[in-house]
Amino acid sequence: MKDQYQKTKEYIQELEFLITLEDELNGVMVIQKESAGIKNLIIGVAYPILIIEQFIFTVNFPSLEIFKSLLQKNRDIIHGAFVLNETGDKVIFRDTLQLENLDLNELEASLNSLSLLLSEYSDQIIKFSKN
């Protein structure tokens, strides 16, 4: 797992993300890149997969409108998807990649997908977070 963690870390650095927290023993790092709108994104190296998670917003008042809109938006997301946490009150962007053949382009595509999603859908995310 250490080799996979190092490879992932090198990719993150090559993509010019800032690593703000690192726990190599548990295979976790927290990254950010303000220019991409990404802050406190969690990367988990859990062989055989790489887990990418970004908290998006808290659902204060659950509604059919919010959940329907999120599911519809999932169809447009190139990589990853909106998911709910176990208690259903937090919306998270999540993507998983195979570590065995992970390359820089694949990781970059997932991170770009999140960045694009945040820029395109920001008005709706803000609206939902206030409800």
Image (cartoon, grey):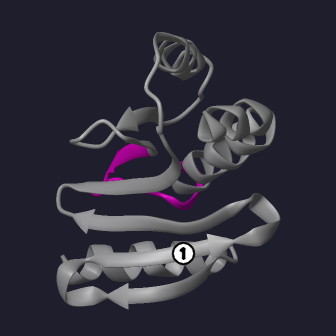
Residue 127 in the image: x percent, y percent?
Answer: 71, 33
Give the secondary structure at mark 1. strand
From this view, report whether residue 62 is shown above or below residue 120.
Answer: above
- In the picture provided, is 22 more to the left or to the right than 10? left
Q: Is residue 99 magenta?
A: yes
The answer to whether 22 appears left or right of 40 in the picture is: left
Amino acid type shown at disc 1: Ile
Report the residue at 28% width, 67% height from top.
Answer: 45
Q: Quadrant of residue 36?
A: bottom right
Q: Nearer the viewer, residue 34 or 124?
A: 124
Magenta region: which residues? 94-106
Residue 121 pos. (x, y %): 73, 33
- The answer to which of 123 and 39 lies nearer the viewer is 123
* Residue beneath the point at 33% across and 55% down: 51
> Which residue is at 62% across, 19% downward?
76
Q: Position of residue 23 (x, y in %)?
A: 29, 88
Q: Is residue 55 magenta?
A: no
The vertical placement of 9 against 78, above or below, is below
The residue lying toward the viewer, choosing from 29 and 127, is 127
- Residue 55 at x, y = what percent? 48, 54
Image quadrant containing the C terminus: top right
What residue is rendered at 38% in x and 34% in y?
A: 83
Q: In the picture shown, does residue 9 fall above or below 94?
A: below
- Assign the N terminus to one quadrant of the image: bottom left
Say few, some or many: other residues with alpha carbon within 10 Å of mark 1 (under 14 / 14 to 19 / 20 or more). Answer: many
Residue situated in front as seen by the camera: 123 or 30: 123
Tag 1 residue: 31
